[in-house]
Amino acid sequence: MEGIVLIGYIAAVFIGLVVGLTGAGGSILALPILTYFFGVPVELATGYSLFVVGWVAAVGALRNGQKGNIDYKIAMVFAPPTIAAVYFTRKIIVPAIPETIVQCQGVSLSKDLGIMLLFAVVMLFAAISMLRKKTQNTLDSSDLQWDVARVLKVVTEATVVGVLTGLVGAGGGFIIVPALVLLAKLPIHRAVGTSMFIIASKSLIGFLGDVTNPSLTIDWTFLIGFTFIAMLGLAVGLPFSAKVPAPKLKKGFGVFVLVMAVFILIDKISSL
């Protein structure tokens, strides 16, 4: 048991490493690590994931902001609807989901299992999106034509990301980065920095929905220690992110998300 926990803490370093390199993917590691290695219940683990990834992304955003890799104009369009959606989801929707969602002919779909399956499906679609779509011509936000159609498209995407973030405890970077590259036409490295800023804002505010939830008991000592270890990985990942060519970074990120999605789907479907 102690060996499994030790592996879990070592794996926590990779949360920060992935966030530092890609601006996303921290929650893709955090949720499985917390549930598989530490036995944290899924609903509580989704909240822990928001806290861990939120703080790791906040430090990463600070570093990227100092380098000019955050597009604040686009972030200000994307962040507010996302923050509102994730807080509402954690505060209202998640507590309202029944413990047993579906029970039919001996097959039972619990709340925890449903959340993990949704998490894996979202990851799968995000991976396919990153692997199939080529990066379009990139622009600075000052060159973009922010007409009503574009604003509505970005706001809709941001709201969907917020709801999904609230449901599965994911920072949403694996959706935000493709959105910033494909919709806002940001260069991949600038999309990574902007993604960290958005993730930090919405994850930490979304976690407040768990703090005020009387049915959840938060182990602050474990949570803060786990977050600190993840930040050690961030310290390694950030310096390397600027040295990795954008196409390789984009493809590698897509492959990583795809592998994790397939693993979780196989594991959880086999338990039905």
Image (spheres, rainbow, N blue to C red):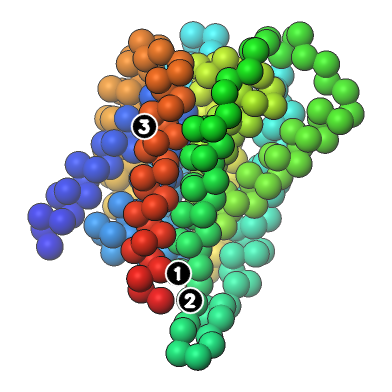
Q: Nearer the viewer, residue 130 or 3?
A: 130
Above or below, 47 relative to 10: below
Q: What residue is shown at x 64% (from left), y 13% (from top)?
A: 138
N-term mark: 3 or 1:
3
Residue 93 in view here? yes
* Residue placed most toward the observer, 256 or 55: 256
Tell me the residue that label 3 is attached to: 18
Q: Residues within 10 Å of mark 3 (few under 14, many from 20)?
A: many
> Which residue is depicted at the point 12% across and 62% down?
1
Amino acid at circle 2: Ser
Q: Earlier in the sequence, mark 3 or mark 2?
A: 3
Where residue 78 sits: x, y (%)? 70, 32
Does 240 sit above or below residue 13? above
From the top left corner, tell me how far across and down residue 145 is, in percent. Answer: 83, 16
> Can you see residue 19?
no
Q: Which residue ends up furthest to the right in the rendered image?
A: 148
Residue type at numbered disc 1: Leu
Furthest-bottom residue in this view: 105
Q: In which quarter of the image is residue 195?
A: top right
Q: Which of 197 and 127 is in front in this view?
A: 127
> Quick one: 209 or 107, which is closer to the camera?
107
Q: Distance between the residues labelled 3 and 2?
A: 30 Å
The percent position of residue 202, horizontal first and vertical second, equals 59, 40
Query: Residue 113 shows which numbered tag?
Result: 1
Q: What residue type is labelled 3?
A: Val
Placement of 68 over or under 1, stated as above or below = above
Q: Position of residue 150 (x, y in %)?
A: 81, 28
Residue at point 68% right, 47% down?
160
Query: Which class describes the residues within 10 Å of circle 2: few (<14), some (14-19), or many (20+)?
Result: some
Disc assigned to residue 110: 2
